[in-house]
Amino acid sequence: MKTKLKPVITCIALAFCAQVLSAQQSDQSQSQRGQRSSTQTSNSVDGIRLSKLKGADVKSRNGQDLGKLEDIVLDRQTGQIKFAIVGKGGILRVGEKSHPVPWQEVKIDSEKQITVNMDKQKMESAPTVTSDYPELNDPDAVLVIYRFYEIPAGAAETPGGTESGQSQKPNSSNP
């Protein structure tokens, strides 16, 4: 009886090995197709998810640490980004100062770092907001923020920043 089972067991083992090899080859080809499609997707979409930006390091134009990107505020009517909220200091957000920076002053370097068009000293004296940013609903408070960053009043009505991440500063010879 042993001699009759040996060929049957051998056939079953060979069939099982063939299935395993076939499954491995199928997995490899699917993996390669997945890599190609994810490469194509990442190359075809040139965007950054806002959720990835939260917590990004914020640097000054000369590389000084200004804090972390705490939040991004959108204009409810236009859907455009209005402010980047930069948090600095404090422990576990207690004592942290939140600075609203007009989007015109922001340049996205990567998902892990953004640059703000100012130096550390100026950032320390920048206007701050409380935890839910109610000040950003007050047109007078928003105007103070835009004036601090030397952004013309008309730009406050049309947020969105420039391609270079730098605001169009008023000419000092013009009033």
Image (tube, rainbow, N blue to C red):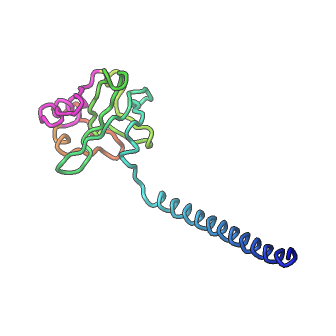
Quadrant for residue 54, please give it.
top left
Left or right: 33, with 21 as reference point: left
Q: Position of residue 24 (x, y in %)?
A: 66, 66
Name of the residue lying farthest toward the right: 3
Q: Position of residue 153 (x, y in %)?
A: 16, 38
Q: Which residues are magenta?
A: 125-152
Quadrant for residue 15, please give it.
bottom right
Q: Position of residue 87 (x, y in %)?
A: 33, 29
Note whether 156 is above or below 86 in the view shown.
below
Foreground of the two, 90 or 76:
90
Q: Position of residue 90 (x, y in %)?
A: 35, 21
Asked whether residue 82 is drawn in magenta, I would say no
Left or right: 94, with 129 as reference point: right
Who's the residue at 45% across and 61% down the image?
Answer: 44
Left or right: 166, with 153 as reference point: right
Who's the residue at 36% across and 43% down the image?
Answer: 164
Q: Quadrant of the C terminus?
A: top left
Left or right: 91, with 171 as reference point: right
Foreground of the two, 169 or 111:
111
Q: Quadrant of the N terminus?
A: bottom right
